[in-house]
Image (cartoon, helix red, strand yellow):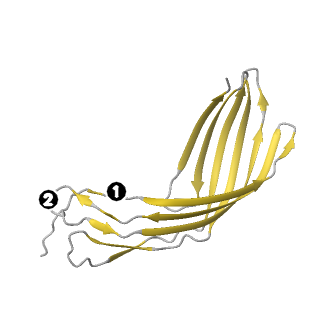
Amino acid sequence: MPTVTTVNQVATGDTGGTQYSFGLGTGYDVRHQAWTFGPYGRLTYLKAAIDAFQERINSSGDGSGLGLADNDQRVESLQTALGAQVSYAVSTPLAVLVPQLLFEWVHEYLNDRRTVNASYVNDPQHISIPFTTDDPERDFFNLGVALSSVFRGSKSAFLYYQTVLGLQDVTKHDIVLGVRWAF
């Protein structure tokens, strides 16, 4: 019967890198009374370089030699987004409130499955261990809701929530809160 050894270690590592991105978007708003409707499109390009790094295990117990040395990585992404937003302005004695709804379809063109090579830090032969990432999902959706308010005296505030739909094993929630006043 084989011997089973339980390993309970924490590996830490620090890396650096560079990221460049470029985006271009356009849209058009149609207004009818208090309603505003606007289709839009966006193109986004991203290129990232992640520097090589080594994991550290700060214990000498079982598994202390399992830290990995990860090679550098390159990531490139090109996405388009097509969407629409609709809002409605409501005037109240306190402020003008503008609830808004946004929905967009995003398509990925470049980001593909890639292989990340690593080796054990303590391996004198540095035998490469390839790790293959999952295939990225090519299509997903963003759904956003917002509430903006404009108060007297050049004051305004907004609350924005966005989530992603249609990605397997990915949950994402963005919440943005902002205030502005002129003096």
* Badge 1 density bin: few <14, some 14–19, many ≥20, Cα 10 Å: few
- Compared with residue 171, is residue 156 higher up or lower down, i.e. above or below? above
Q: Is residue 34 left or right of residue 151?
A: right
* Location of residue 51 (image quadrant): bottom left
Q: Tell me whether the residue at label 2 lies in contact with that at label 1, contact meaning CB atoms closer than 8 angstroms.
A: no
Count numbered badges in the picture. 2
Q: Residue 146, position in %: x, y?
A: 66, 40
Secondary structure under tag 2 reads loop
Classify 40 as above or below 86.
below
Residue 4 rendering spot, x and y as whole percentages:
15, 68
Mark 2 is surrounded, within 10 Å at the Cα level, by few (under 14), some (14 to 19) or many (20 or more) other residues, namely few
Q: Percent position (x, y) of residue 80?
A: 67, 63
Would you name the residue on which mark 1 appears? 14
Which residue does the image show at 80% across and 47% down from the upper left? 37
Badge 1 element: loop
Residue at 77% in and 31% down: 90
Question: Image quarter for residue 36?
Answer: top right
* Callout 1 amino acid: Asp
Q: Residue at x 24, y 68 (%)?
A: 121
The image shows residue 16 at horizontal and vertical percentages of: 40, 58
Q: Give the numbered dot on residue 129.
A: none
Residue drawn 76% across and 20% down?
93
Of the two numbered discs 2 and 1 on the same chain, state the one appearing first in sequence.
1
* Residue at the spot of label 2: 60
Quarter of the image with the C terminus is top right
Please, what is the three-letter code of the amino acid marked with disc 2?
Ser
